[in-house]
Image (cartoon, rainbow, N blue to C red):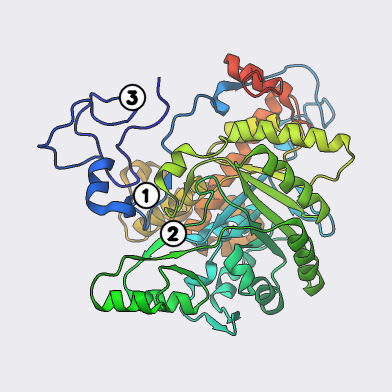
Amino acid sequence: MTYSPSLSSAFNNTKNRSDKLSPQSGMCSLCTEDCIGTCELGLAAVLGAQTVYPTTTGTNQVASEKDYPIDYSHFNINGRVFGAVGTNPTYEEANIFSVNLDRKFGKFNTVKMKMPVILPALIKLNWEDYFAGAAMAGICCVIGEDARNKDPKLKIKDGKVVEFPALKNMLDTFRKYDRGYGQIILQCNVEDDLLGVPEYAIKNENVEGIEFKFGQSAKGTQPVKRLKNIDEALKNHESGNIVYPNPTDSKIVKAYEEGVCPNFYIYSRLPLWNEEYLIFRIEELRDLGLKNVYFKMAGYDSIDLERVIRLASKASVDMITFDGAGGGSGYSPCKMMNEWGLPTVIMQNVISKIIKKLKKEDIWIPAITMTGGFASEDQVFKALSYGNGDVTAIGICRATMAAAMSAKKVGKMIKEGNIPNHLKQYGSTIEEIYGDLADLRAIYGKDANNFPPGAIGVFSYLNKIAFGLKHFAALNRKFDINYLDRNDLIPLTREANELLKGNLFGE
């Protein structure tokens, strides 16, 4: 049995010529010289190193295509019929609508959320509606790393960012709809940090939350992007980025003039932060007015996972997001999305063990968010239950962006009078068709009628997640999700049973 996909992929619109495949390699069993190379191997023979990354990057999202041997589907959700936990067992109080989904976290500054979900880092595609919808839903969202590169008016002086006007627009998409819940957070990688983006954001835009990025499970390394020519290479080099080969090297300049220069690549620095630097750095930013600090971590070695939690505890970090799915905006290596790191449920098992160990040492534990492949309320419920009270929130990124893009497209079609056939039965206007717009009007008044359709879509999708969670909680007669635990899960396979007992495949 093989768990790896064949050499066909949506990453680069490739496909195997034959349906008879060699499981180990993913190649067609019969490979012929007459083939024009429609598989990944054939594309690499023409495009070379470019095919390490998806060629379908653009106005798209991509995600891992590997079918792992275990995930949250290996559990069913338990149910109960007697009593009520978290409320009085009366018909008036013990009902689906009374289930409490509220969350709060923060060591020095409390952040409240209306449901146990956050929207992880992103600054591509329809980010405006992504952030706006988060504010409407009353949850946190994160502006992705390298956001500064989205700003054509960005100015850097003496190695530090001095003008970054686009940041205000990014923040305002959330702040315009802020109703006192959630927070918009700015993610920073090494380049952002070296360029003084955190200082600029705090001083000039009153950013309250900064997330330091160690990695994500789509890419455990930072992205590499090919540059068109030496002019682009020089521009990026002058901005403080790592460019390989160095475009200022006289030998490289000569080679370029002679037409024998290799490709230029821009490469983001690996996060080589340590305790000594980050603890000091975080205190430095808090002195400037930073209220909340976040870490973004991925499915690295278990030793690294424990070290990050210990570091976060020492630095009084408010929340750590652990990412376990190979998906993103398209700047992640194809095979890294499929073949690297701890899958989400396995990583959650490791983290649970680490937290249990640290609690015995009486170590303060930051809020924990799990993300990686979540798209529906059953998955969210299972991960919260598996967390046994140690998981504050679940991150939903790609699915939420899909909702933003779809709702924006549909909204445009409705306004043009071109209503999609499958929606005609619900009405002919946005007010008629967008079912949860009434809930938005109840919060914001009639102004909600003019909200962007994409943002309404994000709110509606998250509202569906919240409503579904309430059903599963009530099914277990738990009317506050703080009471969810592993007793709310039923293992369906031997591996799931071992995980539920805290073992990693029985080890």
Question: Which quadrant is the C terminus positioned in?
Answer: top right
User: Circle 1 sits on which residue?
Assistant: 52
The vertical placement of 127 against 12, above or below, is below
The quadrant where residue 258 appears? bottom left
Q: Amino acid at mark 1?
A: Val
User: Circle 3 sits on which residue?
Assistant: 23
Secondary structure of the residue carrying numbered label 1: helix
User: Circle 2 sits on which residue?
Assistant: 224
- Name the residue at 65% across, 62% down: 184
The vertical placement of 41 against 291, above or below, is above
Question: Which quadrant is the N terminus positioned in?
Answer: top left
- Name the residue at 60% across, 62% down: 189
Q: CA distance from mark 1 to mark 2?
A: 10 Å
Residue sitting nearer the eye, 461 or 395: 395
For the residues labelled 1 and 2, say whether their Cβ atoms are less than 8 Å apart. Answer: yes
Mark 3 Cα-neighbour bin, 10 Å: few <14, some 14–19, many ≥20: some
> Where does the image place residue 242, in percent across and percent down from the top left?
49, 68
Q: CA distance from mark 2 to mark 3?
A: 30 Å
> Where does the image place residue 478, in percent across and percent down from the top left?
76, 28
- Name the residue at 20% across, 29% down: 18
